[in-house]
Image (spheres, helix red, strand yellow):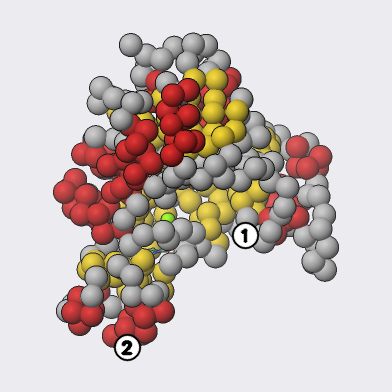
């Protein structure tokens, strides 16, 4: 039996912007929402019906979340697995602790890609000096990544030879790492896949992503440089990865397209994703509503892209002028543009590199969406090339 809209309470572990947009989608369907987050001013906590302001491992807060919610989800992958396990003893938790645990660890993640028959970069797992010494030559030049807790390019070092590799391993604190061969990238893609508890799977159109300084900057859909066959391959690969995990909820799978045209999986996030924010204005069902549908057992159906779209990430840098003085970006100018939809996350303090919001620009054609996006970039002071 699904947890029907208007009758159930949903809980979220984590109060960031992804939690906020989840709560807004759930509330729009008529669900009551509780958020657990230790920050009194968290973006999701301030919009939820109730904010449990406590540590993620606080036993009393976890008990309260479990007793008051019919189903619980998470909005960040580093939520402690034992917290999800405790909640799952009495409540529906989606995605489940075991699937999240795979996504939290690059070594386990890559093993799962191998098991799913989806090609990833050649790699080696480094857990000791012996593993370091045994690294095969063909993995260099490469990228050394901590197995856990990396994000937005953090916890990574590019290395060209064994000397640099040894120094990087030392600099990263000798924690468990994965060394990946440096691949010749043509472009980067991601795919949202949604899987229900009964195993039904739907995927969204492929997103083409541009990163700047390791952080997502621009997402464009339809992916302008990806042909239909490669898009179908990416969607089928994402579906296989989600099914093999027994995953329930929205999963985002990141891919590389290599210069020779091959598709290679990079990593995955067990939640709605920054590159999926375009769905809020360009699709007939957003990634956040899909998360609600999956965890409550409501029907999943193929989402439809109704408009070409460009998503621009809005980082805290935009809140400062060239002299470093704080300012408010020209929202009125931006919102005058055709197809512009602004989403701000309610963060009081802007900091360079901090994700403050995003702007979706839809159009009747890809060219129209792109033209609006270029004008938005000019009004905001963002680079307009991507
Ligand atoms: N094996 C690789 N070869 C070439 N570029 C890579 C490789 N792995 C990562 N990158 C680049 O580094 C970026 C960040 O790496 P990623 O594994 O996605 O970590 P993060 O968790 O920081 O997003 C990627 O988006 C890509 O541009
Ligand atoms: Mg990434």
- Whether tag 2 and tag 1 are in contact, CB under 8 A, the answer is no
Figure check: 102 above or below 64: below
Name the secondary structure under disc 2: helix
The picture quadrant where one finds residue 228 is top left
Q: Which mark is residue 262?
A: none
Most extreme residue toward the front, as rendered?
A: 60
Q: Residue at x 52, y 37 (%)?
A: 36
Say whether residue 360 is visible. no
For label 2, the crowd category at 10 Å Cα-Cα, with few meaning under 14, some 14 to 19 and many 20 or more, is: few
Image quarter (top left, top right, bottom left or bottom right) of the N terminus: top left
Residue that numbered label 2 is attached to? 163
Q: Residue at x 23, y 75 (%)?
A: 128
- How far across and down, in percent of the image, does residue 318 sit? 72, 56
Figure check: 179 above or below 119: below
- How far across and down, in percent of the image, does residue 309 sit? 56, 38
Counting labels gives 2
Q: CA distance from mark 2 to mark 1?
A: 31 Å
Q: On the rendering, which quadrant does ligand 1 occupy?
A: bottom left
- How far across and down, in percent of the image, does residue 55 sit? 51, 45
Figure check: 241 above or below 339: below
Figure check: 288 above or below 58: above
Residue that numbered label 1 is attached to? 353
Q: Residue at x 36, y 26 (%)?
A: 91
Q: Viewer-proximal residue, 14 or 236?
A: 14
Image quarter (top left, top right, bottom left or bottom right) of the C terminus: bottom right
Name the secondary structure under disc 1: loop
Q: Give the mark, 2 or 1, whose residue is nearer the N terminus.
A: 2
For label 1, the crowd category at 10 Å Cα-Cα, with few meaning under 14, some 14 to 19 and many 20 or more, is: some
Say whether residue 114 is visible. yes
Q: Residue at x 23, y 50 (%)?
A: 113
Give the left or right position of residue 78, taking residue 325 as reference. left
- How far across and down, in percent of the image, does residue 305 sit? 48, 29
């Amino acid at each position: 039996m699904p947890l029907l809209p208007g009758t159930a309470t949903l809980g979220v572990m984590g109060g960031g912007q992804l939690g906020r947009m989840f709560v807004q989608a759930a509330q729009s369907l008529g669900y009551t929402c509780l958020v657990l987050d230790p920050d009194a001013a968290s973006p999701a906590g301030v919009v939820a019906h109730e904010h449990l302001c406590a540590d993620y491992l606080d036993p009393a807060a976890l008990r309260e979340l479990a007793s008051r919610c019919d189903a619980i989800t998470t909005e960040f992958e580093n939520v402690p697995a034992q917290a999800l396990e405790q909640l799952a003893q009495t409540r529906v938790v989606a995605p489940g602790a075991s699937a999240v645990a795979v996504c939290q660890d690059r070594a386990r993640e890559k093993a799962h890609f191998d098991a799913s028959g989806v090609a990833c970069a050649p790699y080696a797992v480094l857990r000791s000096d012996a593993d370091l010494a045994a690294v095969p030559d063909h993995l260099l030049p490469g990228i050394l990544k901590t197995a856990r807790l990396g994000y937005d390019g953090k916890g990574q070092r590019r290395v060209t030879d064994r000397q640099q590799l040894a120094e990087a391993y030392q600099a990263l604190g000798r924690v468990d790492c994965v060394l990946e061969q440096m691949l010749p990238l043509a472009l980067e893609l991601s795919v949202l896949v949604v899987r229900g508890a009964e195993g039904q799977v739907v995927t969204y159109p492929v997103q083409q992503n541009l990163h700047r300084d390791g952080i997502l900057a621009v997402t464009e859909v339809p992916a302008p440089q990806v042909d239909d066959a490669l898009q179908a391959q990416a969607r089928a690969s994402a579906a296989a990865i989600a099914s093999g995990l027994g995953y329930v909820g929205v999963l985002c799978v990141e891919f590389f397209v290599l210069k020779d045209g091959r598709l290679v999986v990079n990593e995955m996030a067990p939640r709605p994703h920054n590159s999926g924010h375009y769905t809020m204005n360009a699709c007939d069902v957003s990634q956040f509503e899909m998360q609600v549908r999956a965890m409550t057992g409501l029907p999943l159906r193929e989402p439809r892209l109704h408009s070409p779209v460009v998503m621009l990430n809005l980082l805290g840098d935009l809140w400062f002028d060239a002299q470093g003085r704080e300012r408010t970006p020209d929202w009125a100018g931006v919102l005058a543009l055709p197809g512009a939809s602004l989403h701000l996350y309610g963060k009081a303090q802007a900091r360079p590199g901090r994700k403050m919001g995003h702007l979706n620009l839809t159009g009747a054609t890809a060219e129209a969406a792109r033209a609006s996006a270029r004008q938005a970039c000019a009004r905001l002071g963002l680079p307009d090339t991507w």
